[in-house]
Image: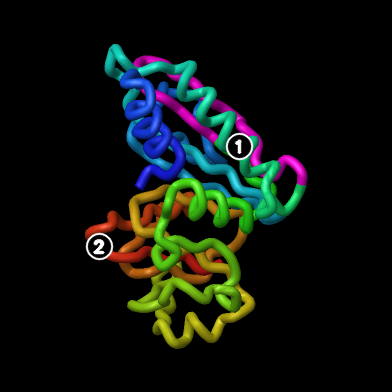
Amino acid sequence: MKYVLKTLLCTVLVMVMAVGLTACGNKVGDIEMKEGESAIYIDEDGTVSYGVSEKFAEDYYNEDDLQKKIDAEIEDYNNGKKASVNQAITLEKFKVSDKVATLILDFATVYDFNEYVRAYNNEDKTKFYTGTIADNDDCKIKGSFVSPDKSKTATAKEIKAMTKSNIIIVNDKYKVQLDSDIKYVSENCTVNEEGIVTTAGAEQGLSYIIY
């Protein structure tokens, strides 16, 4: 699940039969992405940056066609009824370098990030969610949880009771940075010294981050 870019690469490949990040300058928050990685950064003001990298190595890949597809999807969302504000999505960066495509999108709100991913990338609503626990009607919360420093644990029932807290639920591997204190993560996540969370792959079940 490489939401935006992987889906667009496949779409352009089908449409036109043509379709690691470079070492520096491809940051999402403080996350320096490598080829094949996806990253999410959520600022304390609720804005979101989302980045993804994919190989772009075949001779029949077409950078201009992919650029047009990206621009069209952003415009379509911004002009649609689901956009919460004007320019809900902006393109921070799209670049192909050393046969790797880099895409970074900025979202005005967590809501717009959630809606865009679900609507344009056909993400199952039971497996992807960003927002408050109180508003989470589709994704189940299950499993065991631990604080980043591993000093505290919590059950799914205790997490569900934290209705005013925010939660990220994903079903693939991401690097996630939050400009807020992380309260708990599911046990299949790891947290490094900088507080960056790496979620589990889909084969290990849903990953949860509570903040």
Q: Give residue 88's mark.
A: none
Callout 2 environment at 10 Å: few (<14), some (14 to 19), or many (20+)?
A: few
Q: Quadrant of residue 54?
A: top left
Which residues lie in the magenta part?
A: 86-104
Q: CA distance from mark 2 to mark 1?
A: 32 Å
Residue 121 in the figure: left or right of residue 190: right
Q: Count every numbered label the image shows and give the total.
A: 2
Q: Is residue 38 above or below residue 196?
A: above
Q: Amino acid at mark 1?
A: Ile
Asked whether residue 7 appears in the rendered view, the answer is yes
Residue 109 in the figure: left or right of residue 198: right
Q: Is residue 68 above or below residue 195?
A: above
| Label 1 sits on residue | 74
Task: Work out whether residue 126 or residue 153 is closer to the camera in this orientation and state it.
Answer: 126
| Label 2 sits on residue | 204
Tell me which numbered mark, 2 or 1, is placed earlier along the sequence: 1
Does residue 89 show up magenta in the picture?
yes
Residue lying at the far right of the rendered structure: 86
The image shows residue 2 at horizontal and vertical percentages of 38, 43
Q: Amino acid at mark 2?
A: Gln
Task: Work out whether residue 4 or residue 197 is closer to the camera in this orientation and state it.
Answer: 4
The image shows residue 43 at horizontal and vertical percentages of 64, 51
